[in-house]
Amino acid sequence: MARGWSAALVAAALGGRGAVVRADEASHQYADGEPIKLWANKIGPYHNPQETYNFFALPFCSDDDLANVEHKWGGLGEVLEGNDLVNSGLDMSFKIDRAEPVTLCAIRLDADKVATFEYAIRNHYWYQFYLDDLPIWGMVGEVAGDGAPSEEGGADGGADARAAAAAPPAAAPATDGEALMYTHRRLSIAYNGDRVIQVNLTSEAPAALVEGAELTFTYTVEWHPTEIRFGKRFERYLDYEFFEHQIHWFSIFNSFMMVLFLVGIVALILMRTLRRDYARYTHDADADDLDADVDESGWKQVHGDVFRPPAQPVLFAALVGAGAQLCAMALAAILTATLLTLYTGRGAVVTTCITCYLLACLVGGYTSGALYAQLGGRQWTRVLLYTASLFPAAVISTMAVLNAVAIGYRSMSAVPFLTIIAMLLLWIVVALPLTVAGTILGRHLGGAADYPCRVNAIPRLVPEKAWYARAHVLVLLGGVLPFGSIFIEMYFVFTSFWNYKFYYVYGFLLLVFAILAVVTVCVTIVVTYFLLNNEDYRWAWTAFLSGASTALYVLVYSIYYFALKTKMSGFFQTVFYFGYMLLFCTALALMCGAVGYLGCAAFVKRIYRNIKSD
Ligand SMILES: *[C@@H]1O[C@H](CO)[C@@H](O)[C@H](O)[C@H]1NC(C)=O
């Protein structure tokens, strides 16, 4: 992108038509006969989406070609998503047919190459090309008498683009179980005016891998006019049947019912606890009777302790701040994705998330700063540093492990050193100052402790409780309903992430996000009410953890998903799967914990407002 623009600027400065020709890949407009590049991105086993290698990691062409392959730089997000586009070497021009097979290169097979190709074919290696930013997939080869994996099961997207990767039957009769290598690629490209609309890649001419033989790679290109508009060219990649299945609608409806039910329960609790207010408003003669019977109920007994700062206030405030920041990030990113078609760009989702995360530092700093000031703490620089670094530290430690594995495998999923430096710089230059600004704002605008009751000097004894009223049981139970409200959506999100589908239904995601927030707050309120009624005033951590325990269930679900819904195998992919899932669950835990705690704090402040502390 950057390269395209700078080239365009230079050409524009020089004047003339050059600008139009040079800006082709950025503007997606081509002149007749203009060269157009086919970029090779990655190659790897079909069932292991993160185990990707550079296209030329397989000995496709001789080594001297490899030394000076041209790279296309696409920005931070693209690199972080594990893309690295190199010139495939296919010579193509806009609207120029190549009906006769053109020879790309020939390789002589030695024992090494035979073994490498055979391994790749037996592990269902496939590769990804890009033409004018349209992705294309192709298989390396096939095992005679075996179906191509894109026809297996329901794992593959319904997009016909990918069906094109499936091979026609072998021309020469081959023994069953023999690995055959495709040597011919047929590119069929549709254009509308000066734009590329569709690309189909068909792999043909499977050849046996015999040591000492020569393999000649050839290709043909054909161009067809089409009426499909440029703006609609990505639609064939979207799996409507999968994402807009009845189940998806039904699950949203279901979660919505759960929301109504929980909101009803919380309303009941509020009505019960706030009876006295209503009695006062209506000048009810029975108000005194009500007082008498309410006084016996447990939650009022702990009014002298309920606003006692939680244990580890620094950590607590930082966790809530980090969670609030992630919430703000998720909300902003989902909103952006709903408004823009992010799925069409490589790395666009990651870039959006990083941008939103950086901006949300303000929210994180504000929340933790205000909360910590309310708790009466003094070590606010520590809170600030914890808030800014808790989640990034989790990301960095996970990435360190994953990167070590990726480098060991020479995979493209390894994050390059320069990208790591760039991320660190972003953290120091943007994240840290914004967190500081947020903290200062939070301390000054939201730092006043507006607790309705005074805290007694001597902490109250917490009575022995039945097993089901203990904090850890409540915490574990707290996650069940929020998990129930999101797990179907989790299935869709996981399937797009781990099974090559383009997630495009961000409207659904937004709804589920809202539902999750409401359900988490309601459940946390119920848990806290129960806890307070059992005369346990240590509600802050319980509220946070009972929201956060949602992520524990998602983690368990992800193990189930790994075992039954994917065909991933090998050390590399397993480490990547669980690394990413752990990170995702950490973020989810922080988010749900913060939402639960903040919602619950408002509830607690409200119900104790009319109790006089003595
Ligand atoms: C690509 O393949 C699909 C499905 O097989 C077909 O409908 C479409 O016309 C093809 N496009 C081109 C440009 O060949």
Image (cartoon, rainbow, N blue to C red):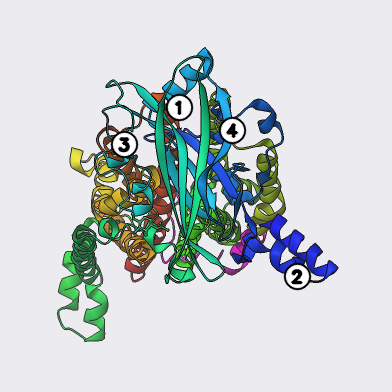
Tell whether position 442 is magenta: yes
Q: Give the mark nearer the N terminus: 1 vs 3.
A: 3
Q: Secondary structure at mark 2?
A: loop
Between 517 and 416, the one lying in front of the other is 416
- How crowded pointer 1 is (Cα within 10 Å; few <14, some 14-19, many 20+) is rated as some
Q: Report which residue position mark 2 lands on.
A: 17
Query: Would residue 285 appear left or right of 412 to someone viewing this image?
Result: left
Q: Is residue 296 above or below residue 475?
A: below
Q: Give the mark nearer the N terminus: 3 vs 4.
A: 4
Q: Secondary structure at mark 1?
A: helix
Question: Gap between marks 1 and 4, in whole Å?
Answer: 32 Å
Q: Is residue 576 above or below residue 587?
A: above
Nearer to us: label 1 or label 4: 4
Contact (Cβ within 8 Å) of mark 3 with mark 4: no
Question: Gap between marks 3 and 2, in whole Å?
Answer: 46 Å
- How crowded pointer 3 is (Cα within 10 Å; few <14, some 14-19, many 20+) is rated as some
Question: Gap between marks 1 and 3, in whole Å?
Answer: 20 Å
The residue under label 1 is which amino acid type?
Phe
Contact (Cβ within 8 Å) of mark 2 with mark 1: no
Between 181 and 442, the one lying in front of the other is 181
Q: Report which residue position mark 1 lands on.
A: 572
Q: Is residue 470 above or below residue 278?
A: above
Question: Gap between marks 2 and 4, in whole Å?
Answer: 34 Å
Question: Gap between marks 2 and 1, in whole Å?
Answer: 49 Å
Q: Which residues are magenta?
A: 437-459
Q: Report which residue position mark 3 lands on.
A: 149
Query: Would residue 8 appear left or right of 439 to someone viewing this image?
Result: right
Q: Give the mark nearer the N terminus: 2 vs 4.
A: 2
Q: Report which residue position mark 4 lands on.
A: 105
The residue under label 4 is which amino acid type?
Cys
